[in-house]
Image (cartoon, rainbow, N blue to C red):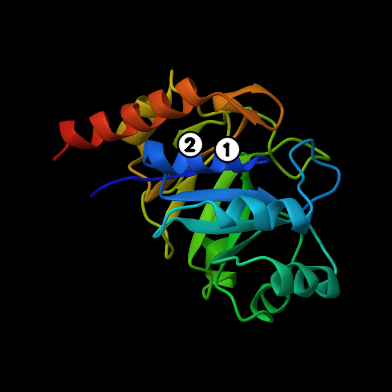
Amino acid sequence: MRTRVKICGITRPEDGQAAALAGADAIGLVFHEASPRAVTPEVAAEIVAVLPPFVTVVGLFVDAAAARIESVLSRVRLDCLQFHGDESPADCERFPVPYIKVARVRPGFDLVQYAVGYRHARAMLVDAYVPGLPGGTGRTFDWDLLPARLPLPLVLSGGLSPANVALAVRGVRPWAVDVSSGVERAPGLKDGLKVRQFIEEVRNEDLRHA
């Protein structure tokens, strides 16, 4: 199986284009205003406009009002929504776009049961649990907390970088990996070399298991 790669927190067209040309399967656009990686719909549309074909565009929201999400969808071509907050399954399913639900993993958290509740999601993205923060902390978590099987494809996030992503792919065997701060030179500004190194590490690990 080929591990898919998502580069999240893209804030500039040149970074989105560079990630795609480096081999990213998807890019993430953050529509959560409190994030240092937040983009406006206008900038997001500029990023999407320069992407080559077959790159999935994911829009990230955190407990956003339905009207806010609908407004973004009317102005930006998003292929998938990513919900980082306390959105219910009904909240996630009300839009005509597939979605991913995020779970922040910690000891005692029943990820299987949580995933069952979001059975119509396309995947479950797992991130580190940090009290009061919805994600994007750049922290790893204990991958041994992940169950051997989930009812949804698993997207692994949380503190990944070129230095540890091969180990993550080897140990977890996720459907996809998601990175943001681990390939940046500053919040929201991607480092092209780190992006290429990250993707190369994933591809090399896949080849070792082919």
Q: Residues within 10 Å of mark 1 (few under 14, many from 20)?
A: some
Q: Disc 2 residue type? A: Ala
- Identify the residue position indicated by label 1 in the image: 14
Which image quarter: residue 21?
top left
Picture coordinates of residue 143 (x, y %)?
A: 47, 34
Q: Is residue 152 above or below residue 92?
A: above
Picture coordinates of residue 132 (x, y %)?
A: 83, 40
- Left or right, 68 with respect to 140, comes to right
Q: Disc 1 and disc 2: Cα gap in Å?
A: 6 Å
Residue at 54%, 58% in the rendered image: 57
Residue at 76%, 75% in the rendered image: 70
Q: Residues within 10 Å of mark 2 (few under 14, many from 20)?
A: some
16 or 154: which is nearer to us? 16
- Identify the residue position indicated by label 2 in the image: 18
- Left or right, 33 with respect to 72, comes to right
**For numbered disc 2, what is the local secondary structure?**
helix
Residue at 39%, 36% in the rendered image: 22
Q: Is residue 87 above or below residue 209?
A: below
Q: Disc 1 residue type? A: Glu
Point out the image quarter for the C terminus: top left
26 or 1: which is nearer to us? 26
Which image quarter: residue 91?
bottom right
Q: Is residue 77 above or below residue 146?
A: below
Picture coordinates of residue 182 (x, y %)?
A: 56, 26
Picture coordinates of residue 107 (x, y %)?
A: 61, 39
- Left or right, 23 with respect to 103, comes to left
Q: Is residue 109 visible?
A: no
Residue at 59%, 35% in the rendered image: 180
**Disc number placed over residue 171 in the picture, else none:** none
**For numbered disc 1, what is the local secondary structure?**
helix
